[in-house]
Image: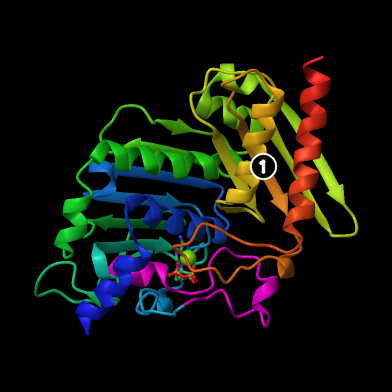
Amino acid sequence: ESVVNRIAAGEIIHRPSNALKELIENSLDAGASSISIAVKDGGMKVLQIQDNGHGIRTEDLPIVCERFTTSKLREYEDLSTIQTYGFRGEALASISHVSHLSITTKQADSECAYKATYADGKLVPAKPGGSSAPEPCAGNNGTILTAEDLFYNIRSRKDALKNIRDEYTRIFEVASRYAIHNSGTAFTCRKLGAPKADLNTLHGASTITNIRQVFGAKISNSLVEIQHKDQELQAEFKGHVSSAAHEMHKSVFLLFINHRLVDHSPIKRAIESLYTSVLPKGSRPFVYLDLRIKPEDVDVNVHPTKREVRFLNEDIIIAQIIDCIHNKLLSTNN
Ligand code: ADP
Ligand code: MG
């Protein structure tokens, strides 16, 4: 049974960066205004995330890593109107099957924090021969989640993820994109032991300030703002897009649909061909797009491994995005 679970878990958690995405979403779901990420060996040795969110109830600790355990469907009868990222209760379970996982958590009304250690979905003793019950300890309000030795029990996966720098780049990419989009949450991301964080955004900073933090002033200064609202479809978008040829050698898309970081090939293709036709040859788009669509028009039930989403009236909305960017490019380049 544990081998089957492990294989299933490996299908959900492919690499450190997609474990991190799940963990960031949990911290955001917990209302965190601060999220700190620390990484060793591209997240393969250590992937740690600390938040100041509402924490986990002590009585929930024994079950949070069991499959399909979620606290997020309590208030929602209808999945299509759910406001949280999570609802499946698969992420922690999966991570516990493919790493050594520990959780330290404290709720504001609790006198102390509790530390719990997991293997294969269940509580285990922190040290051999000890008790598996969560141990009281000192700690701040919020949650620290540490996944160590990712894929220690899936040899083939571990072997396939040998490029530690590449894994760190992916981690940084996920963290920085969520940081840019969530201006109400301060983010840091660092390599364990490094003197300086690679990412350091402030609570309440504007989107453009966060973009400058991550991509530099040259990029952020070349951006113009777009905004549009469609009353009838109840869809709206805003964003920052590059207005002139810039030095990026590849296109950069930061695409959020109802706050989820997603891929959407048709949107990307349409924007790329717009830039090719309007700007000097070789110009690549930099696009941050915050698209909000009626929740019931978006397919939220996509599998966690799929970043590609679908929504209703795609053609109309894509045409509006292209129109909006096109007008902006024409007015700024003339
Ligand atoms: P889901 O997010 O789909 O509910 P997860 O496996 O990601 O499932 O998490 C399981 C449960 O653990 C969540 O429903 C939540 O109650 C709790 N949890 C996980 N991470 C945190 C966190 N950082 N802060 C507070 N609660 C958390
Ligand atoms: Mg989750």
Please, is residue 200 above or below residue 36 in the view?
Answer: above
- The reply to whether residue 72 is visible in this rendering is yes
Mark 1 surroundings: few (<14), some (14-19) or many (≥20) residues within 10 A: some
Question: Which secondary structure class fits the magenta region best?
Answer: loop
Range shown magenta: 70-96
Instruction: Classify 33 as above or below 206.
Output: below
Magenta stretch containing residue 90, yes or no?
A: yes
112 relative position to 315: left or right:
left
Query: Is the residue marked 1 within 8 Å of ligand 2, measured from its CB?
Result: no
Residue 327 x %, y %: 83, 30
**Quadrant of the image containing the C terminus:** top right
Q: Which residue is mark 1?
A: 270
Q: Position of residue 110 (x, y in %)?
A: 46, 67
Q: Residue at x 56, y 61 (%)?
A: 29
Residue at left 52%, top 76%? 71
State the residue in front, 215 or 241.
241
Residue drawn at point x = 38 percent, y = 68 percent: 92
Q: Amino acid at mark 1?
A: Ala
- Of the 4 image quadrants, the one containing the N terminus is bottom left
Image side of residue 240 versus residue 59, left or right: right
Membership of 312 in magenta stretch: no
Residue drawn at 23 percent across, 55 percent down: 148
Left or right of 97 on screen, residue 188? right
